[in-house]
Amino acid sequence: MSERPYTPAASPAPVALTGGGRGSAFLQEGREHDRAGRLGEAIDAYRSAVRAAEEEGARRLLAEALRRLGVAHHRRHEAADADALCERSHEVADAIHDDVLAAEALNALGGFRLERGDCESARTLFARALARGACSPDLTGRIEQNLGIVTTIHGDAGSALEHYERALASFRISDNANGCAIAFHNLGMLSSDLQRWDEADSYFRRSLEIAESVGDVSLRALCLLNHTEVLVARQHFEQARHNAEEALRMFDQLGAQRFKPDAYRVLGVIYRETGRPALAEARLRAAIEMAGQSESLLCEAEASRELALLYQSLGRNQDSLKLLNTSHRLFRRLEARVDLTDVARRMEVLEGTYLTIVRDWGESIESSDTYTHGHCERVARWSEAVARRMGLDEAELTTIRLGAYLHDVGKIRIPHEILNKPGRLTQEEREIMAQHPVYGVELLASVEFPWDIKPIIRWHHEKYDGTGYPDRLRGDEIPLHAQIICIADVYDAMTTTRSYRAAMTREQAMAEMRSCRSWWRPDVFEAFEAAAATWGESEPPRAAA
């Protein structure tokens, strides 16, 4: 989804103006250029309308032309000019006591604030506009639309739906086809956010149909782009590709560069899902680069996540983790943004992706050894149960889960004949095996994790009494998380069948571990013992995904 996917209704249907002078002709010409996406020509025509209105003393026409000129400058990201022109439009309308034109200017200014992330200022301006423009169904529809966007950003889907539906009803009363198209588009976006794909598909198709009939190129391009999420979710990949490519063509025509990274991201996802990894990588890389240039943090974060999924499917796990870390860092920067919807949900999706990729990598390491298959998953569950007994928070639980999935990643470098030896290891072989924590940290040296995972990987075999490896740490030199993974790792090893011995029962394992309790911090062992008392035989409790 684009960084500001909900479409503010800042461009109204024409206010009825008396007279048919040069100013009105220029205004009409500007509107025609505007609808066709020719912003440069539209701005020239609106400027001519302003000059003619000033010469003719047509103050209502002047207020209208100033506002439309301001909206056109806003579309070209010329914020200072846009604000100044709409504020002047409001002053002119106020001086002649024209409530509708004054409300139009306030609504446009509110739309500008909304797109810049100042939701509270936008809400205030929309409320002022609604109070002054209530006599106009068309204007009421546009203000309700914009209030719907504000409530969507605040996460109030129920109120947003009511605003959009009231907007649609008002547009139908005023016979504003373009307004109906925007309302349908925003209802489609809301339905997509709620994953109501059938409803979203219907809304987007109705919006596209109207936008095409009225010649609104900008809305049609946005609608095509945002519809792609629905099409991809329903696995209609060819139609999604067509939509994204058509949207790209329109964005080029409009000079709307800020939406192009999202179109490239969508194309990358489509190519990945249809088995064309080279094209997928190229498009996703382009999306990341363009998003970085345009400072579209949300698109850069989501494109990085999608490329990470591609690399994971290709077995490029370290590259995948680097990109997930980049995505996580960008989402953290976005958490303070009040103009974006569902950042928390998107972060939750990202962390779920992170866990899935790390889990899959851990399982792939184990897959060649039937005796240790499922080990990392079980260690993650045992560890989480212990951590919860100790009252650790959710961030620490995430760290422990990820550390558990990756604690044995260094075994990739252990020779196959040692890793899969059907019997006890020699002293020399044990020394080689004991290097796997070091190898794991070396393997991930270039990966900067958002969580403190590397100490777990290096020190998950250290013992509290100093008898562990590889660094012979003692006591509180060993991080708590590593101690928790260590005790879960030992328990799982004891209760799992190995090539040189049968699995111990839970009672046998607990007895053995009590005799070795000096290996762990007292509070860690106590939490483990309390948690283990509730476990079934060799069956870890179900951990959070």
Image (spheres, grey):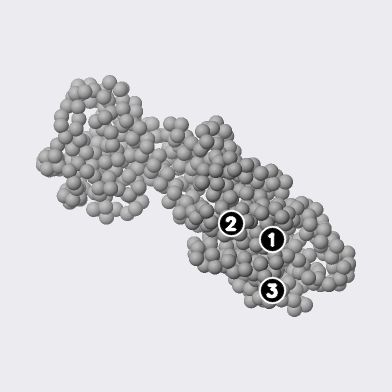
> Is residue 436 something that shows in the picture?
yes
Which one is nearer the viewer's eye here, 432 or 511?
511
Q: Which of marks 1 and 2 is nearer the N terminus?
A: 1
Q: Do the residues labelled 1 and 2 touch (CB within 8 Å)?
A: no
Q: Are marks 2 and 3 in contact (CB under 8 Å)?
A: no
**Horizontal side, residue 85 vs residue 409: left or right:** right
Determine the CA span between mark 3 and mark 1: 16 Å
Which mark, residue 136?
3
Q: How crowded is mark 3: few (under 14 residues within 10 Å), some or many (20 or more)?
A: some
Q: Are marks 3 and 1 in contact (CB under 8 Å)?
A: no
Amino acid at pointer 2: Tyr
Q: Earlier in the sequence, mark 3 or mark 1?
A: 3
Q: Write the residue at 37% across / 35% down.
A: 361
Q: Write the residue at 73% across / 72% down.
A: 101
**Horizontal side, residue 301 vs residue 430: left or right:** right
The residue tagged 2 is 203
Q: How crowded is mark 1: few (under 14 residues within 10 Å), some or many (20 or more)?
A: many
Q: Quadrant of residue 284?
A: top right
The residue tagged 1 is 178
Q: Write the residue at 52% across / 53% down.
A: 198
Is 180 drawn above or below residue 18 in the view shown? above
Image location (x, y in percent) of residue 288: 56, 41
Which one is nearer the viewer's eye here, 161 or 253?
161
Which mark, residue 14?
none
Image location (x, y in percent) of residue 459: 28, 38
**Horizontal side, residue 440 vs residue 461: left or right:** right
Determine the CA span between mark 1 and mark 2: 14 Å
- At mark 3, the secondary structure is loop
